[in-house]
Image (spheres, coloured by chain):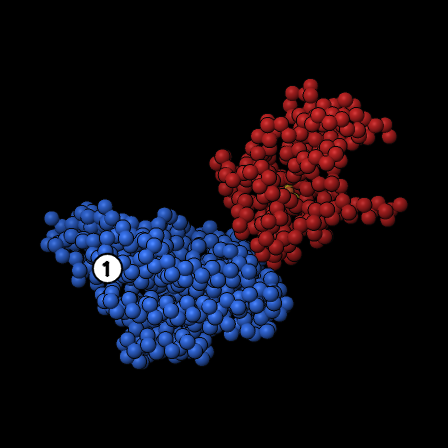
Amino acid sequence: MAETISINPVTRIEGHTRIDIFLDDSGAVTDARFLATSFRGFEAFCLGRSFWEMPGITARICGICPTSHALASALAGDRLLGLTVPPTAVKLRRVLALAQVIQSHALSFFFLSLPDFLPGLRDDPARRTLTELARSHPDLVTNAVQLRRFAHDITSRVGGGVVHPQWIIPGGMAEPLSEKVRQEFLSQIPGLIAIATATIAQFRQMSDGLRLAGRLGSLPTLYLGLTSAEKTLEYYEGELTVMDRKGTLLMAGAVPERFPELVAEELSSWNYLKGPYYAPLGAVDGSYRVGPLARLNLVARAGTRLADAELATFREQVGAGHPVHDVFFAHHARLIEIMAALERLQELLDDPTIIDRRVRSRAEVNQSKGIGVCEAPRGTLCHEYHVDENGLLERVNLVIATVQNSPAMNRAVREIARREIRGARLTEEVAQLLQIAIRAYDPCISCATHAAGSNGLVIRLVAPDGTVVQAFPT
Amino acid sequence: MPALTLTIDGRLVSSRAGETLLQVIRGNGIDLPTLCYLEGLSPRGGCRLCMVEVAGREKPQAACVTPAEEGMVVTTGSERLQRYRRQIVELLLAERNHTCSVCVVNGQCELQSLAARFGIDHVRYAYLSPRLPLDASHQRFGMDPGRCVLCARCVRTCDEVEGAHTLDLRGRGVRSCISIDLNEPWGRSETCTTCGKCVQSCPTGALFEKWTARGEKVRAPELIPRILAWRETHER
Ligand code: SF4
Ligand code: SF4
Ligand code: FES
């Protein structure tokens, strides 16, 4: 009999999702899909509101990357006002973008993925929890907490809110930075850099033992993201860069506002995630990825000393000049980005102009369309607003990192299911592998669907007639 | 002026004739909650938050519109009154769209602080969630009827202090709305002088200066009585 197996829920990801694996009558895998099962509709209920409210409203899309949404929103607002943001406000926004990267990557690596890696694969699922990790490796958990506390402190004292930074506003920042706060943050950075260094060393050790490289889906895709003009890591403004599967740049130096014209979206009947692709190449060839792996593939250098040294190691894995396609290395990429962010924060906070009091420009609505693009931890984030003459929203389009990665996640899931599922049964090991693969993308389903819902990922095996023959967890 | 003697919360107090119960109560250091009352404006008795119990009268009385009388025995904080006040604030919250987290006046809102004062951590009534369009047509000010509690402080300020009478109430019951001139967009009003006093008097984020972001609205309702006092000094 042809069958369906579901896994429900896969925990330790952000949001509510399901993997459906479709079988034929012989029990072989025909297809597999990674789906978002909830719907929120931010783009609809924001209509008629003022763009001034949007950094606050859209920050609520996500509890992990609220700063990224606020930044993209404020950038779109800046464009609607048609003004130039004071240079110090730009620096403060960069500080917040970097804190966002540290906070989110530390969560993804230490809390969501390490519980898979440390007890060892195929271990008892009951041991693959954060509580267990805290018991066996208290040092690692303390490191994670320190990194995240530092990042949260920045969000709260530079951004004006522990979770939702309310000082990021169209025109700049609502409040400047004080010398006292600047010194406090500067004094913490050396200790955190030491933590990042140690974590990278530990990761290298465990990653050899895991033998996960090559098993999580490594289909080549294009890469898209922002880089600085010097082709170093950039999370705020910068230039749009697109790379093909072989590492050749298809596009470089484009203004971020061109994002909506370069990316087309395919609406799906079976999924609340839209499937975006790089428009010039079409839906089939234009599948691309964003996020830590993409960014490290796109840049020439990280742009800071320690991160650059580690980037060289990262590239040795495939040979210089080639993009790293294997999603397992996204974990490594996240750690390198944490390092780069700490070093960049040091530079930004060392700059005495960071405490300048002039952080806000004012204007009335001067443009009817505003596009804001930044790099969220999970990849390129675009907010596009169209307003009436009074600044009330007539159209809103949000393009989110996880959505852009969802076609690649689908392919990874299909690849793993085809290779590993035998006899129409989902074993604990395969279910774990599927979850590890999904977690390597660090998907955020709340963001992707702008959707509410409880946590969890369900995996189902589905028969040709649509019946679910196995669901995981049962 | 003849003096009166009353009992408030078991305490003997004196007052001058012509004072309202609210004036006597507050004058004696009791922090009676109000919402539609704003010093300097004619009292309206609309919100009922200031209600007190007066011995011999069955129904609670709105202190802001009840004159103090000789020998009155007044209770300001009985269990019943507290229950009613809580219900009033919950109903106000359920009637419109009070999303504090993204509101311009978050942290400085009178409705929000009343809710906090009464320990309202959830609302027991179904939210009406009306779809009420923003008016952002005025060059300097915006109005979000979704945050309006219909206290009419703005209406009275515009009429009694600025003398423009641009604002008024239209409609009935919970569906009432502030209307501008003969229900025009604010930006087309011919009577509005752009003085901004209505924005200062508004207890919530319903009226705000444009280009204010979350929590940025600075409220100064005390400006209204101050303006009136200055005016009196000048006229003398
Ligand atoms: S700005 Fe002044 S004149 Fe205009 S509506 Fe408000 S109070 Fe009235
Ligand atoms: S707009 Fe403000 S002041 Fe006017 S009635 Fe509504 S809440 Fe009261
Ligand atoms: S303050 Fe007395 S009824 Fe509103």
Q: Left of A152 or right of it: where is A224?
A: left
The chain shown in blue is which?
A
- Image coordinates of residue A65 in percent, x first then y, are 44, 59
Q: Residue furthest top?
A: B56
Q: Nearer the viewer, residue B195 or A126?
A: A126
Left or right of A199 in this view: A70: right
- Position in image of residue B43 (x %, y %): 72, 36
Q: Is residue A247 visible?
A: yes
Mark 1 closeness class: few <14, some 14–19, many ≥20 residues within 10 Å: some
Residue pictured at 55% horizontal, 38% vertical = B119
In this rendered view, identify the residue nearer to me: A419 or B196: A419
Q: Between residues A429 and A412, which one lies in front from this camera angle?
A: A429
Q: Quadrant of residue B82?
A: top right
Q: Position of residue A362 (x, y in %)?
A: 62, 64
The answer to whether the beta carbon of the residue marked 1 is less than 8 Å from any atom of ligand 2 is: no
Rendered residue at 44%/54% (across/down): A63
Up/down of A239 relative to B225, above or below = below
Q: Relative to the observer, which residue lies in front, A199 or B26?
A: A199
Type of amino acid at the residue the image marks with label 1: Leu
Give the colour in which the image draws chain B.
Answer: red
Say which element carries label 1.
loop
How many numbered discs? Answer: 1
Q: Quadrant of residue A118?
A: bottom left
Residue at x 70% of width, y 52% of height: B196
The x, y position of residue B109, in whole percent, is 61, 46
Rendered residue at 83%/28% (across/down): B3
**Residue that mark 1 sits on:** A121
Using the rendered image of the protein, determine whether residue A244 is visible from the camera's viewpoint.
no
